[in-house]
Each structure stands twice: as structure tokens, then as C-alpha cells.
Amino acid sequence: MNGYTIMTIDDESQMRELIRTFLEAEGYRVITATDGVNALSILEKESPDLFVVDVMMPFMDGFEFAKEVKRNHSTPIIFLSAKGDEWDRVNGLKLGGDDYIVKPFHPAELLARIESVLRRTYQNTKSHDLLTVGPLVIDADAHTILMNGQELSLTLKEFGLLQLFAKNQARVFSREQLLHLIWGEHHKSTERTVDTHIKTLRLKLGAQSHLIETVWGIGYKFEV
């Protein structure tokens, strides 16, 4: 766990679960709500560190929720919207939003935006996020991975794969799950793409390539 709690508010169950799955794999605690009214009721018992809020929702949309929550909270907000109109972006930022992402988006983009907002908001109050697993030291903030003290030169996808594996030791991921979590919901890649990235990642791990194990007929797992 990296210590942060994120509330995602969206009336689309598939979107809520996509965000929850991806963020929990990254070590975040995730709370979900179906709309602004539901979220406000949850806030009576919970104090998230960041809101990921869909703009277009029934009962209370994202902008109305922002107006309400900013009366009593300084918690940062990232808006999600299928509308990329400049007026919506400007309005969201005027209401206290810290960022605005247009759907559809890549989960890795959302993660990068979340990390950026959290860093700006809590850099002096939360501890640096380091994960040590066997010979690896993963610095999520600096986006670096050291192996036996030497930094690995990784692509964005390779970093995402290795970080996901390290945070979920011994868990078996199918190729389709890895595509969904690292390449995103709207990916156009094939399972062969995962195999290719695993091959290059193993080459870069060198003598530690055995850490990524093939589970025949299913996918891959990481185990020290």
C-alpha cells in the first residue's frame, strides 16, 4: 500500500471497476460511488486523499459535487468526461478541479495524472513511495527501478509490467488481464504483444530473469 485512498465517482459500473482494478494493482485503496449524492453520504465516514469524478452523472453531476465538496474539503479532484469542450475544461478547473481527462483514456495516463496531483498536494506530508522486492527497488514517484543498485532502462510498458508483478507477488496474470491493466481498456494489441514485452523485460533483468515465471496455458507471475 502506498498510503493513499482514492474515491472514484462514476455512474458506469464498468468504468468504476476498471479504475478500481488498475489503481488497486498500483497499491491504492479505492472507494467507489455511483453519483455525487452517493459520494457525499460516503464522505460522512471516509476521508479520501483524491477524487476521480465523472462529470456527467444522474442526481448530482461532477461539477455540482465539486461545488458541494469544496465547501468543506480541500481534497484534490480530477474530472473525467466524454466531452472535451474547452468550456467544460475551464469550468472544471474554476470549480477547483486539479486536472481534467477526456474519455476514453489510457489507464496509464490516469495513473500518471493521479501521481502528479498527489505529488503536488502531499509532497511534504506523505512519505516517499519505495517498494523493495528481492533485488529490485521500485520508486513509483521517480518512475525508476533499481536492480542490485543499478537502474534498469525500461519502456513505459515494461515499467508498468514489472511494477504490477512486484506488487502482486505469486499472483498469476493472464495475457488478457495484462493487456487490460497495462495497455488499457481500448487497446488494439494482441496477446503476442505481451509475450514480446515479457521477453525483452527478461533480457533486461539478465540473471534475475527467472523472477518472471511462465504459467503454461494461463500467463505469467512474479516470484522471488
Image (cartoon, grey):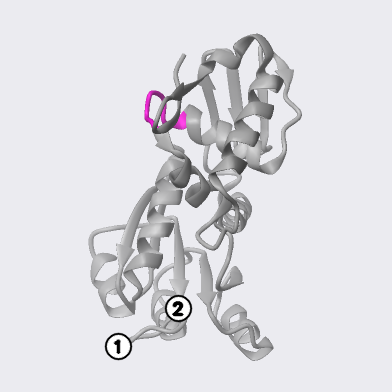
Type of the residue with mark 2: Ala
Q: Is residue 128 visible?
A: no
Type of the residue with mark 1: Phe
**x and y, in percent, of residue 163 in the image:** 55, 33
Q: Nearer the viewer, mark 2 or mark 1?
A: 1
**Which residue position is annotated with label 1?**
59
Q: Is residue 169 magenta?
A: yes
Toward the top, the furthest residue is 207
**x and y, in percent, of residue 55 in the image:** 47, 81
Judging depth in this view, the residue of 82 and 124 nearest the camera is 82
Q: Which residues are magenta?
A: 167-172
Which quadrant holds residue 218? Answer: top left
Mark 1 secondary-structure assignment: loop
Give the side of residue 136 with respect to residue 222, left or right: right
Q: Magenta-highlighted stretch: main secondary structure?
A: loop
Mark 2 secondary-structure assignment: helix
Residue depicted at 44% across the width and 82% down the height? 67
Which quadrant holds residue 139? Answer: top right
Specify the quadrant that holds the N terminus.
top left
**Disc 2 to disc 1, how far (Cα)?**
14 Å
**x and y, in percent, of residue 60 in the image:** 34, 86
Judging depth in this view, the residue of 48 and 53 nearest the camera is 53
> Is residue 80 positioned above or below 50 on the image?
below
Residue depicted at 56% across the width and 71% down the height? 104
Q: Is residue 179 magenta?
A: no
How dense is the environment of label 1, judged by Cα within 10 Å: few (below 14), some, or many (20 and up)?
Answer: few
Marks 1 and 2: in contact by CB < 8 Å? no
- Mark linked to residue 66: 2
**x and y, in percent, of residue 108 in the image:** 59, 52
Judging depth in this view, the residue of 98 and 102 nearest the camera is 102
Give the side of residue 146 with respect to residue 25, left or right: right
